[in-house]
Image: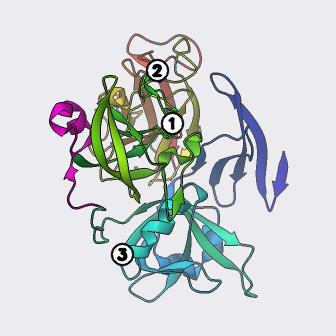
Amino acid sequence: MAVRNGAVELALAHRETDHLDGGILTVDPRRRVVIWEGIDGDLGCPAKVYGSTWEASPAEIAESPAEFEGEAVRVRGRFEAAAGNAPARLVDESGAAVFVTADPDIARLVAVEAKRWPGQTLEVTGVVRRDTTAPAPAPRYTVSFWDFDASAVPAAPAISAAAMTLKLPELLANADGAKGRLVRVVGQFRGRNLYGDLPAPSFRHRLDWVLKDDRAAVWVTGRAPRGRDFNLDPNRQDDVRTWLEVVGHAVVRDGQVVVRAEKVALVPAPSAARVKAVRIAAGSSVHPVVVFTLPLDGDRVRSDARFVIQFNKYMDDDSFVGHVLLRYADSPGSGGFPTMKLAYDEGKRALIIDTGVALEPGRRLECRLLSGIVDADGLALVPRQGTAAPDVIDVLHFEVER
């Protein structure tokens, strides 16, 4: 344990199905911020989770950057490319600007996509950090972002207009009709079958790698997952967040659809894109359980809080629908928040809950995880402690600040 500038840092580890993950939990009572970040190296937890996300403008951050340091923010503005030693900027209508830099996890994708961004409106989500490398005498702060919304940017042309554009589920459903034809597909890079999306014996060549959208997965072969601006490693899970556009000829090999790639390009994840896990490599004998939450169970939360629940295994995100109830604890007859939205981050094995409305000050909340939630193996969620009730597996409690 260490105390730095009034913030308490705890080195912690939690057990996964077959190994330990380590990280640093930082609690800053002055700014009311909780941060969990994995340590470097093989033991580092892949999750990087911050407290509630603030909506902020470039002007608000520029006016008082120190007050936002360590905070997760969502900021929108006109994108200006990096110049000289200065990072890229987002500029609002008043002319105020904030520096932005891509998190290493998405740096390759951003390097390619950012060529279309100058002068366009962009929204990023990240954490405000002090830039210790800045040469200027005054402190410089940047938003290190892990997510971006470039939906307002005009779409780039397809890398091959002559190819027949198909979604991966459509390609698998009409494999005979597409066989031998030039097709264009978009999906998430899944490495060399790192998540067991396809039968292991169907791997045939060192250039084989998997592309997936929803539950549909295909082998891509004939071309490595790299281009002028990117180079993905089929054996690293860190690269699996990347989405690719592939143009090639569809063939059937040993009963499996294969795309013999001619062109490969990076693309942003399509709107509402989903990739569903098949199974966890550790096997199906371990039941899923909640291992971490932000805010922490029992904590006080802000009125704009979002809730993150991390599990020890990859989950079937369809099973969350109808089985997660967030409501005020003093209104047991309440059906929860009609505006609530659920999102599942497979890379972090985390469920994100957004109520969609401001929470009422002073009210107590409870998040009920109901019977029916299962992991990618179909195994049912179990409680962290004790025995599950007939319909309620686990309950988290929070209190909204006054």
Rendered residue at 48%/50% (across/down): 225
N-terminal label among 3 and 1: 3
Name the spot of residue 378 as percent of width and height, x first: 41, 17
Q: Quadrant of residue 32?
A: bottom right
Which dot marks residue 201?
2
- Amino acid identity at mark 3: Thr
Local SS, label 2: helix
Drawn side of residue 272 relative to residue 309, left or right: left
Q: Nearer the viewer, residue 74 or 258?
A: 258
Which residue is located at x 35 percent, y 33 percent? 331
Q: What residue type is labelled 2?
A: Pro
**Nearer to us in this view, 318 or 161:** 161
Classify mark 1: helix, strand or loop: strand
Image mark for residue 309: 1
Is 339 inside the magenta-drawn segment? no
Image x and y of residue 348, in percent: 53, 40
Query: Which residue position is annotated with label 3?
Result: 121
Q: How far apart are marks 2 and 1 (CA)?
A: 35 Å
* Quadrant into which the N terminus falls: top right
